[in-house]
């Protein structure tokens, strides 16, 4: 081959990886033992190259030695270990979303989180493809000492610019917006994952709060389309998405909101056949008396998974909401007959309001589906111990329902105490689930075990997320970011693609709110100040967007 003719390497059938990689050094040594020397060398920047005989500072781990490193925040990627060893050695690597996870036996589901690795002489090893904040390196007692030039995380992520913003006079809410957006961002890998450590899968219902957060924070749409299409294309016509009838409902709702925010009619038109088939199948799930009759796996979230009565109460609202969205999409796709059938079905479902039995999740779905009295449900159910009896997934819908009932201030209090409670225990991303009761006698995820106290990671959880299997970076938990942008900053589309926008800030007791919402034409920027009983508003709209 004539090298002069080569302009760049091109591998046959290669597909570009549209994610980036960045080296991230550790920021803290959590623990070291058994004669480890100069562990501070690992905190001294990024070092990824060995040199024969004259290496710079080295951290030496003797046989039986160990070290636990903290990278400062949850990230996704792998560990890169560079050695100055003159002999082949070994180390057990354990990833952890918490310190306690590095000290235990983490799950190997979806990714390998613990492994005994060979470390090369004067070389480098890369290990992992998961989410972590902490790493433990242990040298077996019968292995040669290990001389470490550097231990860095290789972060793998999508290099997206945060085009949406949220700032207020409440720093706790500001931090929650940032962590919510970052949680979802981290889960945007080859597809939009549910959890980037465990459950590295595309779950349709979980996508809704993730997509809404992406729409609030980023001007990126290709991965949303790719993920929605993945679920559609991998579901036979006679099956429900992810085998859950409710998750097929969420596909319809996601399509409507995605179209409303981005206005991509060409993409919507590609969904016409699948949408028509799915809506017709869902229309058969309305009983003659107006009750929902969704089939097979009937699921809202895990907190209601074992209670058929609560599931029915919540699914009643979800199906009505689905048909509202289906009617909007069918109208856009010039199918008036299907649109009318969806509207009739939604109206019929609203004639039946199953008892929510005091459950906030069921009540939220009834409020959002227009089933039952929103203010009554809010007063009687949502305000009763408002930050209890919710989940990080459906807590987002509880927030939306409270806003629908005119109680934004109450929703903000829930965000502060519930999502803020995770921050208080060391979270840098939001978790698969959380209960404030867990915090009564617990230590944080960034601490070594404290005698007499509970491990908030390893000692709690239920259903599919018991103990260390519990994911501490779950995309469905990022909903407060979307909520703060839509309901507090108050920016939402009034027509597909934001050619018309509604600007209705609701400060909920705050005195200052400002931020931006991405649109296909650029950002809408808004600043609101409360001065006495009046609000002063400064609004900047792209020229293609009209306020209504």
Image: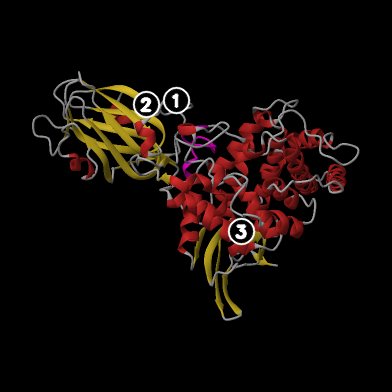
Q: Nearer the viewer, residue 84 or 73?
A: 73
Decide if residue 438 is on the left or right side of residue 125. right
The answer to which of marks 2 and 1 sits earlier in the sequence is: 1
Tell me the crowding category of disc 3: few under 14, some 14 to 19, or many 20 or more residues within 10 angstroms, Cα based.
many
From the image, tell me which residue sits under label 1: 108
Residue that appears at 38% across and 30% down = 104
Q: Residue at x 80, y 33 (%)?
A: 281
Q: Mark 2 = which residue?
A: 114
State whether residue 8 appears in this view.
no
Considering the whole magenta stretch, tell me its main secondary structure.
loop
Asked if the residue under mark 1 is in contact with the one under mark 3, i.e. CB atoms within 8 Å, the reply is no
What segment is highlighted magenta in the picture?
185-200
**What residue would you read off at disc 3?**
411
10 Å neighbourhood of mark 1: few (<14), some, or many (≥20)? few
The spot of residue 105 in percent (x, y) is 39, 27
Q: Tell me the residue at 50%/44% (across/down).
A: 438
Relative image position of residue 5 (x, y in whole percent):
33, 30
Q: Please identify the quadrant where the N terminus is shown.
A: top left
- Mark in the foreground, 3 or 1: 3
Is residue 188 covered in magenta?
yes
Q: CA distance from mark 2 to mark 1?
A: 8 Å
Whole-percent x, y for residue 410 in the image? 62, 61
Given residues 240 and 455, the one toward you in this image is 455
Q: What separation in Å lies between label 3 and label 2 (alpha carbons)?
A: 40 Å
Question: Is the residue 527 above or below the residue 360 in the image?
Answer: below
Q: Is residue 268 above or below residue 49?
A: below
Quadrant, the C terminus: bottom right
| Disc ID at residue 520 | none
Above or below — where is 492 with respect to 238?
Answer: below
């Amino acid at each position: 081959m004539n090298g002069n003719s080569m302009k760049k390497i091109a591998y046959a059938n290669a597909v570009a990886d549209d994610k980036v990689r960045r080296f991230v050094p550790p920021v803290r040594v959590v623990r070291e033992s058994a004669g480890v020397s100069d562990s501070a060398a690992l905190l001294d920047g990024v070092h990824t190259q060995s040199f024969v005989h004259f290496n710079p500072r080295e951290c030496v781990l003797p046989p039986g030695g160990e070290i636990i490193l903290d990278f400062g925040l949850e990230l996704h990627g792998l560990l890169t270990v560079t050695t100055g060893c003159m002999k082949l050695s070994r180390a057990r690597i354990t990833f952890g979303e918490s310190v306690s996870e590095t000290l235990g036996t983490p799950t190997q589901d979806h990714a390998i989180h613990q492994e005994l690795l060979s470390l090369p002489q004067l070389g480098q090893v890369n290990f992992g493809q998961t989410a972590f904040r902490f790493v433990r390196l242990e040298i077996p007692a019968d292995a040669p000492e290990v001389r470490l030039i550097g231990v860095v995380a290789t972060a793998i992520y999508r290099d997206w610019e945060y085009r949406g913003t949220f700032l207020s006079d409440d720093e706790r809410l500001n931090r929650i917006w940032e962590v919510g957006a970052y949680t979802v961002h981290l889960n945007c890998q080859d597809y939009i994952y549910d959890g980037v450590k465990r459950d590295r899968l595309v779950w349709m219902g979980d996508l809704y709060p993730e997509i809404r957060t992406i729409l609030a924070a980023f001007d990126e749409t290709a991965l949303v389309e790719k993920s929605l299409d993945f679920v559609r294309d991998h579901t036979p016509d006679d099956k429900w998405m992810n085998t859950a009838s409710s998750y097929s409902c969420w596909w319809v709702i996601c399509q409507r909101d995605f179209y409303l925010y981005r206005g991509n009619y060409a993409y919507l038109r590609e969904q016409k056949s699948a949408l028509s088939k799915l809506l017709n199948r869902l229309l058969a799930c309305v009983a003659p008396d107006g009750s929902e009759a969704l089939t097979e796996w009937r699921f809202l979230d895990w907190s209601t998974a074992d209670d058929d009565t609560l599931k029915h109460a919540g699914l009643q609202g979800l199906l009505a909401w689905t048909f509202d969205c289906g009617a909007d999409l069918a109208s856009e796709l010039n199918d008036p007959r299907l649109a009318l059938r969806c509207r009739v079905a939604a109206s019929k479902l609203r004639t039946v309001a199953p008892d929510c039995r005091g459950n906030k999740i069921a009540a939220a779905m009834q409020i959002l589906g227009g089933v039952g009295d929103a203010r009554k449900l809010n007063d009687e159910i949502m305000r009763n111990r408002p930050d209890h009896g919710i989940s990080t997934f459906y807590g987002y819908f509880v927030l939306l329902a409270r806003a629908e009932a005119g109680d934004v201030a109450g929703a903000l209090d829930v965000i502060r105490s519930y999502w803020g409670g995770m921050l208080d225990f060391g979270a840098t991303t939001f978790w698969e689930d959380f209960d404030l009761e867990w915090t009564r006698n617990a230590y944080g995820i960034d601490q070594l075990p404290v005698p007499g106290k509970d491990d908030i990671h390893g000692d709690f959880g239920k259903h599919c997320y018991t103990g260390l299997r519990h994911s501490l970076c779950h995309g469905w938990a990022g909903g407060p970011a979307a909520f703060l942008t839509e309901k507090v900053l108050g920016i939402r589309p009034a027509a597909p693609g934001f050619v018309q926008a509604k600007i209705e800030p609701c400060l909920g007791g705050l005195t200052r709110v400002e931020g931006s919402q991405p649109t296909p034409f650029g950002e809408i920027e808004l600043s609101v100040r409360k001065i006495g009983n009046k609000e002063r508003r400064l609004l900047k709209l792209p020229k293609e967007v009209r306020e209504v």
